[in-house]
């Protein structure tokens, strides 16, 4: 008896990810989950120089600034709650010192520009269609930084607005990196603070826009993270205690689906070798000076050397 419906996924034979690939992840916090997996398995990857970005207009602003080599100045930052912030980025970049924040912003611009030019695969996770517009400037913000809500107006991006934003994101990146592959996904994390119906409307707009863009642009793909969570994992045992975020079991499951679909067969073999090494390195001995433990460490070093002979860029 089959008690689960499964979403069919075909491996991408034309442009799979391997250990020579350079992967850049942008977007909502689910991109952090996938990014952590890629880092654990020692792929060449980087993620979110500006911190977590939830909606397409925030990502568009980042890409536009990076490709045009924008320079942040004092007019782009503001002081609130004893910290300096920028509406373009997540609060993890905020600082008590203005100059420090400006340095972080301009470093992020430079690193993003470099990553966009050199990446073979760009993975973008969209979280929501809801945006906040700052009334004083009439600009859409990436993060409100707990500035009082009455200073913003909340809006839902239409399918057409999202499609135009995604089209601009892809076009800007292709201008500096014509050979890049794009993997889009919708975050499986539900934004229930917006409301249950509002969350579904938001996700629906994202999905509709992504499938329109996929038709327009070549080397543009869709990975169904949201659909896997909602259908294959439709049980609250796959959520954290907040009943919103996927728990480690769900993240591992979606990672496995992503691996089957996007990582080359040769690289999958290497991931198993690396997982064995990682687990060995996490091992805590009863006696670190024992002969048995030293022998164990020698064995681990041999395994590392074997991997590094083929992939010298991998380090542990």
Image (cartoon, rainbow, N blue to C red):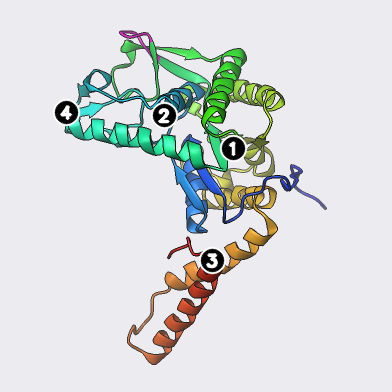
Q: Position of residue 270 (x, y in %)?
A: 60, 64
Give the Cα separation between the discs numbered 3 and 2: 33 Å
Q: Secondary structure at mark 2?
A: helix
Give the Cα separation between the discs numbered 2 and 1: 16 Å
Kindly identify which residue carries mark 1. 180
Q: Tell me which secondary structure the magenta stretch mostly adopts.
A: loop
Give the Cα separation between the discs numbered 1 and 3: 26 Å
Q: Residue at x 24, y 17 (%)?
A: 75
Kindly identify which residue carries mark 3. 274
Span colored in magenta: 133-138
For marks 1 and 3, the one nearer the N-term is 1
Taking 197 as reference, is 231 left or right?
right
Q: Is residue 291 above or below residue 146?
A: below
Does any portion of residue 197 appear in the rendered image?
no
Q: Is residue 254 magenta?
A: no
Point out the residue furthest to the bottom here: 291
Kindly identify which residue carries mark 4. 82
Q: Residue at x 45, y 42 (%)?
A: 47
Numbered disc in front, either 1 or 3: 1
Counting other residues with Cα less than 10 Å from the Cα at mark 4, is it few (<14), some (14-19), or many (20 or more)? few
Q: In the picture, residue 215 is in which quadrant? A: top right
Give the Cα separation between the discs numbered 3 and 4: 44 Å
Q: Which mark is residue 66?
A: 2
- Quadrant where the C terminus sits is bottom left
Numbered disc in front, either 2 or 4: 2
Q: Secondary structure at mark 3?
A: helix
- Tag 1 and tag 3, C-beta contact below 8 Å: no
Counting other residues with Cα less than 10 Å from the Cα at mark 2, is it few (<14), some (14-19), or many (20 or more)? many
Counting other residues with Cα less than 10 Å from the Cα at mark 3, is it few (<14), some (14-19), or many (20 or more)? many
Counting other residues with Cα less than 10 Å from the Cα at mark 1, is it few (<14), some (14-19), or many (20 or more)? many
For marks 3 and 2, the one nearer the N-term is 2
């Amino acid at each position: 008896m089959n008690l689960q419906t499964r979403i069919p996924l075909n491996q991408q034979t034309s442009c799979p990810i391997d250990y020579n690939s350079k992967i850049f992840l942008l977007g909502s916090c689910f991109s952090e989950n996938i990014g952590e997996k890629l880092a654990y398995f020692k792929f060449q990857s980087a993620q979110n120089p500006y911190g977590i970005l939830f909606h397409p207009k925030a990502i568009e602003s980042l890409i536009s600034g990076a490709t045009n080599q924008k320079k942040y100045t004092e007019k782009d930052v503001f002081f609130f709650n004893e910290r300096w912030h920028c509406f373009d980025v997540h609060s993890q970049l905020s600082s008590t010192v203005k100059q420090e924040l400006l340095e972080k912003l301009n470093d992020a611009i430079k690193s993003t520009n470099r990553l966009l030019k050199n990446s073979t695969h760009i993975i973008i996770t969209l979280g929501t269609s809801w945006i906040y517009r700052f009334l004083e400037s009439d600009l859409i913000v990436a993060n409100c930084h707990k500035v009082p809500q009455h200073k913003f107006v909340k809006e839902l991006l239409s399918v057409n607005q999202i499609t135009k934003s995604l089209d601009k994101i892809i076009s800007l990146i292709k201008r500096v990196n014509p050979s890049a592959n794009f993997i889009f996904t919708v975050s499986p994390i539900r934004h229930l603070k917006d409301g249950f119906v509002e969350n579904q409307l938001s996700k629906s707009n994202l999905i509709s826009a992504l499938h329109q863009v996929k038709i327009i642009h070549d080397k543009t793909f869709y990975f169904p993270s949201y659909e896997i969570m909602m259908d294959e994992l439709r049980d609250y045992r796959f959520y954290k205690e907040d009943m919103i975020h996927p728990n480690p079991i769900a993240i591992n499951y979606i990672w496995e689906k992503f691996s089957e679909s996007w990582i080359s067969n040769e690289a999958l073999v290497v991931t198993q070798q690396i997982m064995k090494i990682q687990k060995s390195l996490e091992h805590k001995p009863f006696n670190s000076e024992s002969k048995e433990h030293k022998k164990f460490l020698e064995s681990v070093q041999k395994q590392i050397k074997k991997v590094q002979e083929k992939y010298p860029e991998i380090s542990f």
